[in-house]
Image (cartoon, helix red, strand yellow):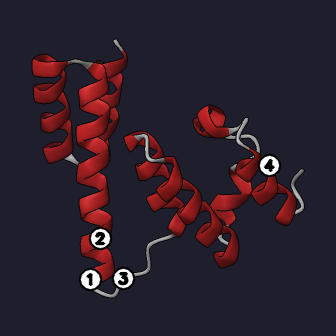
Amino acid sequence: EAIAEWKKAMTLAGDHELSKMLELVYGDAGFPAAVQATARKRLERLNERVKRSEYVPAVHFARAYLRLGEPEQTFHWLEEAREERNALALLMKSDPFYDSIRADPRFAAILESMNQE
C-alpha cells in the first residue's frame, strides 16, 4: 500500500519517470532497493540542476544522502543547510524523516547551532 501511495504522489507531482522506476525496482528487488534507486535518481537530478547553475537547497542533498544511508554526506549537507539559513532546515527538529540520525550528537549540535535545541 505504501508503494502505491508513493507512486501516486510521484505521478501527481508530474514525475512519471520516477514513479515507473519505483514500480519496476520495487517489483524486482523490494522496498529497500526502491528507496535507494529513487534516492540515486533524485541525487542525479539535483546535480544536473547545480550544473545548470540553478539554486538547490542543501537540505535536498541531505535528504537524498540520508535515504542512501550515507551519514557522512548527510551531515555535510545538513551543515551546508544550516549555513544557508534555508527555512527547510528549520523543520529538522520536528520532521520524522530525520529520526534515524536524531541520536547522533552531530544532529543535536546542528540543531543547537540553529537555536533549536
Q: Residue 111: image x %, image y %?
A: 80, 55
Q: CA distance from mark 1 to mark 2?
A: 6 Å
Q: CA distance from mark 2 to mark 4?
A: 28 Å
- Identify residue type, mark 2: Asn
Front: mark 2 or 4: 4
Q: How dense is the environment of label 4, judged by Cα within 10 Å: few (below 14), some, or many (20 and up)?
A: some
Q: Residue 32: image x %, image y %?
A: 31, 25
Q: CA distance from mark 4 to mark 1?
A: 32 Å
- Identify residue type, mark 1: Lys
- Residue lying farthest to the bottom in this orientation: 53
Q: Nearer the viewer, residue 56 or 112?
A: 112
Q: Which residue is mark 4?
A: 108
Q: CA distance from mark 4 to mark 3?
A: 30 Å
Q: Which numbered disc flags the more N-terminal residue, 3 or 2? A: 2
94 on left or right of 51: right
Q: Secondary structure at mark 1?
A: helix
The answer to whether residue 11 of the structure is visible from this angle is no
Numbered label attached to residue 67 = none
- Identify residue type, mark 4: Ala
Numbered label attached to residue 54 = 3
Q: Secondary structure at mark 2?
A: helix
Q: Which numbered disc flags the more N-terminal residue, 4 or 3? A: 3
Q: Which numbered disc flags the more N-terminal residue, 2 or 4? A: 2
Tell me if residue 102 comes above or below residue 56 in the rendering: above
Which residue is located at x 30 percent, y 54 percent?
Answer: 42
Front: mark 3 or 2: 2
Q: Are marks 1 and 2 in contact (CB under 8 Å)?
A: yes
Tell me if residue 73 comes above or below residue 13 in the rendering: below
Q: Which residue is mark 1?
A: 51
Q: Residue 13: image x %, image y %?
A: 32, 47
